[in-house]
Amino acid sequence: MSNPVINRFYDLLIEQATSGLDDAGKAELNNLQLQLQREYPDQDWVAETEAIELTTAAVDCALAAPADTEMPAGMEQRLLQAIDHQPDGRESAELVDITQQLNERKASRTQWLGWYAAAASLVLAIYFGVERTEQPLPPDQQLESILQQQGTQSYAWATPTEPGYEQVSGDVIWNNETQQGFMRLVNLPQNDPAESQYQLWIVDPSRDQHPVDGGVFDVSGDGEVLIPIDAKLMVASPAAFAITREQPGGVVVSAGPLLVVAAVDA
């Protein structure tokens, strides 16, 4: 199954290298890179950005050649053979169309932008072996990677006082620089997702009076659970992490009560 996050990341990189991105596009690209760094910590996403830029520069040079320039001998056949390995599943007919367009070279540069991006994506996959179908690391391996990062902190859950939650323990693992983290929770009561879901809140007075939504989650078993933190906004200076129980899908602003809280030491 294709990974839509990785696909979108590469699409934005290609667009940035070919025609540029507006502020919204740049923000989306930065957020996707943070997410991919969290899910695939062993992958060098900065190198992927550089690879895209080099690839599109090479395609740019090719498109700048005279209109009657033929594609180098053997290149069309190499591209046709490569199409069978494309994770996007492009059809051979599409690649044939690309090569024919490259041979004709009659259109203006603005008309070429679509093929420019398609060719850059194709060359990237051929020469850099981009795989868009890999699965994220298991949560325990992601946590281990975060624990090894400089700046990662651990904040213990305070002993809860809310009835039914007195036995909950564990901690919050958070790296503010990379905006990555996990919750380790022991003995948090199970929930029925059709009736309610747990929701994490990150208190950050430096940015807003309302806490940042850290994502909703479910508990379906006993013992310890490991939950990734999914902060919906950039956290500047966290003061506390708190869990509430909300309606399915979560809420924008919680009315409480706070079931479990981990304070950040000053």
Image (tube, rainbow, N blue to C red):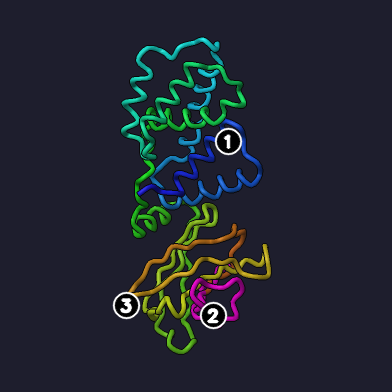
| Residue that carries the numbered disc 2 in the rendered image | 258
Q: Quadrant of residue 65?
A: top right
User: Residue 105's mark?
Assistant: none
Disc 3 designates what residue? 222
Q: Pick whichever of labels 2 and 1 is earlier in the sequence.
A: 1
Using the image as rendered, state which of residue 214 and residue 14 is in the foreground: 14
SS for callout 3: loop
Residue 16 disc label: 1
Callout 2: SS:
loop
What is the CA distance from the residue labelled 2 to the residue labelled 3? 21 Å
Q: Amino acid at mark 2?
A: Leu
Where residue 12 appears, as percent x and y from the top left, is 54, 40
- Relative horizontal placement of residue 134, taking residue 150 as reference (left or right): left
159 falls in the magenta region: no
Choose the circle earlier in sequence order: 2 or 3. Answer: 3
* Residue 167, quarter of the rendered image: bottom left
Which residue is pictured at 49% across the width and 38% down the height? 46
Q: Which residues are magenta?
A: 243-266
User: For the point 54% across and 53% down, which residue is it?
Assistant: 177
Q: Residues within 10 Å of mark 3 (few under 14, many from 20)?
A: few
State how far apart marks 2 and 1 are (Cα): 43 Å
Real-space Cα separation, disc 1 to disc 3, in angstroms: 47 Å
